[in-house]
Amino acid sequence: MSLSITSTIRLSSGHHIPLLGFGVYQNYDSKTSVLEAFKVGYRHVDSAQAYRNEAHVGAAVHESGLKRSDVFITTKIISKYHGYESTLKGVDESLERFGFDYIDMFLIHDPYSGTERRLDTYRALLDTKSTGKIRSVGVSNYGVKHLEEIRRAGLEMPAINQIELHPLCQQKPIVQYCRDNSIVIQAYSPILRGQMDHEVFKSVATKYKRDPAQILLRWSLQKGFVPLPKSATAARIYSNAQLYDFELEEEDMTRLDALDRGKDGAITWNPVDAD
Ligand SMILES: NC(=O)c1ccc[n+]([C@@H]2O[C@H](COP(=O)([O-])OP(=O)(O)OC[C@H]3O[C@@H](n4cnc5c(N)ncnc54)[C@H](OP(=O)(O)O)[C@@H]3O)[C@@H](O)[C@H]2O)c1
């Protein structure tokens, strides 16, 4: 498998997304970190209205000297603001904060608002896509029943589902559903928020002379996911992108695959079962 930091995957919307993303949750100096990330080659940033850093991410894009079309920027709307009209307004507010003419990917952050408001929010995002303000529509923390709800409503399927995903929490039914429906899977908390003190992670890392974060990120890429590691530390922003001069052998992928603990392995809110 030949991957590089510039590798992309085609979304069902027809746009391409870089396979490695840069997370900015709880990053209180996002502009500096995003500029650092661009310098080492990341071209994809995962923000959210709830992170309160869209303006910082936008400023980094403007200051980076990169063309807007060279970067892929995601944001998300949380359940508190779900609903048709509030979503239309929310998209305009995000555009304003970023200082962009368009946003690459707009996600419904979580499924907590109930069937009717989830679908209203989704319809608003699809309608906004047709105006060109956003390029692709996706969801986050959606379980199979939420995805089925979209299909049953006769709406086009999301381009992305962003879920907690790492060897301890592999979300297998959701992953299978997404694969069957051409939905690209973004893996959040791919390095377990830094909690990587697991014997298997350490042993595989020693074998490849890498650190555990690099092993987990490489596992994610080789599974076909789009991992979104977060770091506010320059050295880690760099090391988390050094993933392309080694490949995990099948036996090591199998060892990592065997660590799945289902929902018990989750370390975040993981609301994929919300009503
Ligand atoms: N849709 C959702 O509901 C949702 C939920 C959670 C996350 N996300 C997205 O996914 C991104 C990543 O998830 P996350 O932030 O929860 O967790 P993560 O990326 O798995 O881990 C980030 C934590 O690991 C530390 N870290 C980074 N690189 C490291 C390394 N090489 N070695 C050891 N520790 C390291 C970071 O510390 P330093 O910053 O100090 O380096 C930070 O504390 C978020 O930023 C966000 O964009 C989405």
Image (cartoon, rainbow, N blue to C red):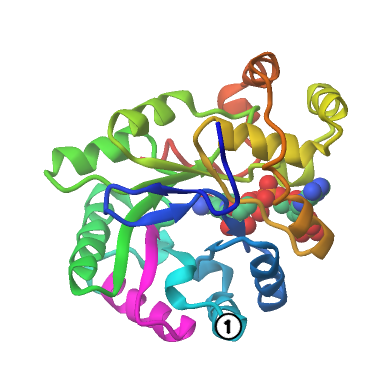
Identify the image quadrant of the C terminus: top left
Q: Nearer the viewer, residue 200 or 121?
A: 200
Please, what secondary structure does the residue beneath circle 1 have? loop
Identify the image quadrant of the N terminus: top right
Residue at screen point 70% across, 19% down: 252
| Residue 111 visible in image | no
Query: Residue 267, located in which quarter of the rendered image?
Result: top right
Q: Nearer the viewer, residue 184 or 157?
A: 184
Q: Decide whether residue 92 is among the magenta residues.
A: yes
Q: Position of residue 256 (x, y in %)?
A: 68, 21
Q: Nearer the viewer, residue 150 or 255?
A: 255
With 234 as the anchor, is 222 left or right in this view? left
| Residue 23 visible in image | yes
Q: Position of residue 120 (x, y in %)?
A: 21, 59
With 80 as the anchor, is 45 left or right in this view? right
Residue at screen point 65% across, 21% down: 253
Question: Which residue carries the number 1 mark?
Answer: 65
Residues rendered magenta in the picture: 86-107
Residue type, mark 1 in image: Gly
With 121 as the anchor, is 139 left or right in this view? right
Q: Nearer the viewer, residue 222 or 47?
A: 222
Q: Decide whether residue 72 is among the magenta residues.
A: no
How many residues crowd mark 1 within 10 Å: few (<14), some (14–19), many (20+)? Answer: few
